[in-house]
Amino acid sequence: MREIGDEVIELAQHQRMSMVSSWTEYLTLSRGAHKKYLLAHACHEALAEESDYFNQEKDDYELPEEINGEPVWVEDGCLVSGRLIINMDDMGLEFDDPSEPEVAAWLNDFGWTENVSVTDLKRAIRWGGSQK
């Protein structure tokens, strides 16, 4: 676990795959809008397509080390930064107490139980400070 910013804590990460791509997905903990906490999926912010940096004359990529002052690397055909963006498509799970049954069910439904337990989540809340 490591702190990503003032309001988001990365709890775990794993590889996800579809028929055409793969990416690293992160489980994050942050302040909820309606309840104390929010568990959500996040991924690195995509800043550009790798193909934008293909030099046809050299028949090779000329990838920048930074974009807008942020270090970048290639992930699934995109240049991404270290900044995590919460995936709002799945809306995550808001909760007040990690012991709520919905928390364990959500972790299980999205395949995170091999990486994170409710005990780990309680520890992260204590480690990250109280969420107001």
Image (cartoon, rainbow, N blue to C red):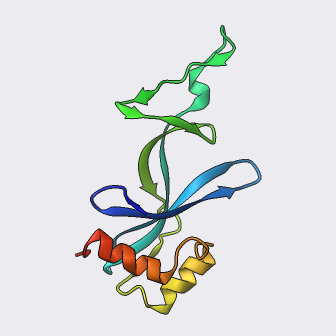
Nearer to me, 6 or 41:
6
Quadrant assignment for the C terminus: bottom left
Percent x, y of residue 45? 46, 46
Quadrant assignment for the N terminus: bottom left
Q: Is residue 100 above or below residue 26?
A: below
Nearer to me, 50 or 70:
70
Percent x, y of residue 67? 41, 30
Q: Is residue 74 above or below residue 36?
A: above
Looking at the image, which residue sits at the far right? 19
Percent x, y of residue 81? 45, 41
Percent x, y of residue 129? 26, 72
Nearer to me, 51 or 66:
66
Q: Residue at x 62, y 37 (%)?
A: 77
The answer to whether residue 5 is left or right of residue 65 is left
The answer to whether residue 125 is left or right of residue 42 is left
The answer to whether residue 86 is left or right of residue 6 is right
Looking at the image, which residue sits at the far top? 57
